[in-house]
């Protein structure tokens, strides 16, 4: 069933936001009778009740809750298109709640998002830093930027840097004292800086060369559930780390860290932007994705120099 009158859709959205049909009517300069008729017409076209109303309260039905985000997105898109036509310029406006990984988030993504916001000031962000995979179904998060293959095939994952891999690295100071491993087998003789995510201890480091895979169980005197802390330990010379290439690209370029066992390839760690539903892929999200892809590519190239 098609929605024939967009004014009915706008009334529904305003009533849901204000929690009152009469308040929505006043906001849209309608009489209470016209507002009530508008809502009834929309419910009749869809064949389901959208709101449960009494003299003192209003709440959405399950069908109303499902319709509300799509209705907002549709109305925002129409407003932006109209403004673009009227002004002849691109309009980018959105509020995005994003979960970021701790290391890349603090040291690169935070600055990139500042740059994005300076270019498009009508976009606002609410950020959350965590290495845990955000539950985009239950948590107040629109988007999550994460490494690795996504465990939930129901998620929409947009690649930001699919070629990213983990890199074995250490500071020059550590190597001067303890020497460098020639092969991954030598890691058993070194202090390795380990990362824990929830109940998973990442002490199995995997490498490949010429089709051969090697898995090494490492040990060390430092363990943390924050990727940024592990990188800082490595830069300070406390041991060997197995980090995302993007996380340490600037450190490699500046000489703060040295790539080890370059003949062996670390395991894949693709970086993706994920969300729960394709309907969340607004023009702003697509623009942000392309912006971040460019920054990731430039960072990765800096780490190879």
Image (cartoon, rainbow, N blue to C red):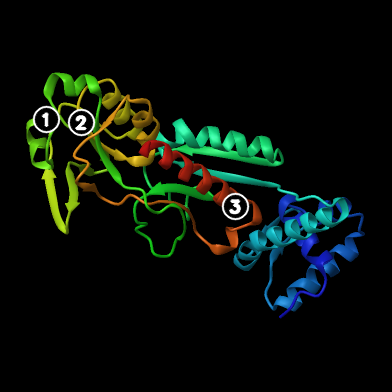
Asked whether residue 220 appears in the rendered view, the answer is yes
Q: Are marks 1 and 2 in contact (CB under 8 Å)?
A: yes
Question: Which residue occupies the foreground of this view, 71 or 285?
Answer: 285
Q: Which residue in the protein does label 1 denote?
A: 190
Which residue: 12% across, 25% down? 179
Give how far across and how far down residue 142 sits, in percent. Answer: 54, 50
Q: Which mark is residue 262?
A: none
Tell me which numbered mark, 2 or 3, is placed earlier along the sequence.
2
Mark 3 vs mark 1, CA separation in Å: 43 Å
Which residue: 45% across, 39% down? 299
10 Å crowding of disc 3: few (<14), some (14-19), many (20+): some
Asked whether residue 140 appears in the rendered view, the answer is no
Which residue: 84% across, 52% down? 88
Q: Which residue in the protein does label 2 denote?
A: 240
* Residue 33 quadrant: bottom right
Which residue: 64% across, 59% down? 69
Name the element at disc 3.
Answer: helix
10 Å crowding of disc 1: few (<14), some (14-19), many (20+): some
């Amino acid at each position: 069933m098609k929605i024939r009158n967009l004014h009915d859709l706008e009334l529904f959205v305003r009533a849901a936001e204000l929690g009152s049909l009469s308040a929505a009517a006043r906001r849209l300069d309608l009489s209470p009778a016209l507002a009530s008729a508008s809502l009834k017409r929309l419910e009749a076209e869809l064949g389901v009740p959208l709101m449960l109303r009494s003299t003192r309260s209003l709440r959405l039905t399950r069908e109303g809750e499902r319709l509300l985000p799509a209705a907002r997105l549709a109305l925002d898109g129409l407003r932006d298109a109209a403004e673009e036509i009227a002004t002849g310029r691109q309009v980018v406006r959105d509020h995005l709640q994003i979960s970021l990984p701790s290391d890349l988030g603090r040291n690169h993504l935070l600055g990139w998002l500042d740059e994005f916001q300076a270019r498009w000031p009508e976009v606002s962000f609410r950020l959350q830093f965590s290495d845990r995979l955000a539950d985009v179904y239950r948590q107040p998060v629109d988007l999550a930027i994460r490494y690795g293959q996504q465990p939930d095939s129901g998620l929409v994952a947009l690649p930001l840097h699919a070629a990213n891999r983990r890199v074995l690295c250490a500071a020059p100071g550590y190597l001067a004292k303890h020497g460098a491993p020639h092969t991954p087998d030598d890691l058993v003789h070194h202090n390795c800086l380990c990362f824990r995510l929830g109940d998973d201890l990442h002490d199995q480091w995997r490498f490949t060369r010429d089709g051969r895979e090697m898995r090494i169980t490492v040990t060390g005197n430092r363990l943390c559930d924050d990727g940024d802390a592990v990188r800082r330990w490595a830069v300070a010379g406390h041991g060997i780390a197995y980090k995302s290439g993007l996380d340490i690209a600037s450190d490699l370029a500046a000489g703060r860290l040295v790539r080890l066992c370059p003949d062996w390839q670390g395991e894949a760690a693709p970086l993706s932007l994920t969300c729960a539903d394709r309907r969340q892929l607004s023009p702003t999200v697509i623009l942000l994705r392309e912006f971040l892809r460019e920054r990731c590519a430039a960072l990765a190239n800096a780490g190879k120099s």
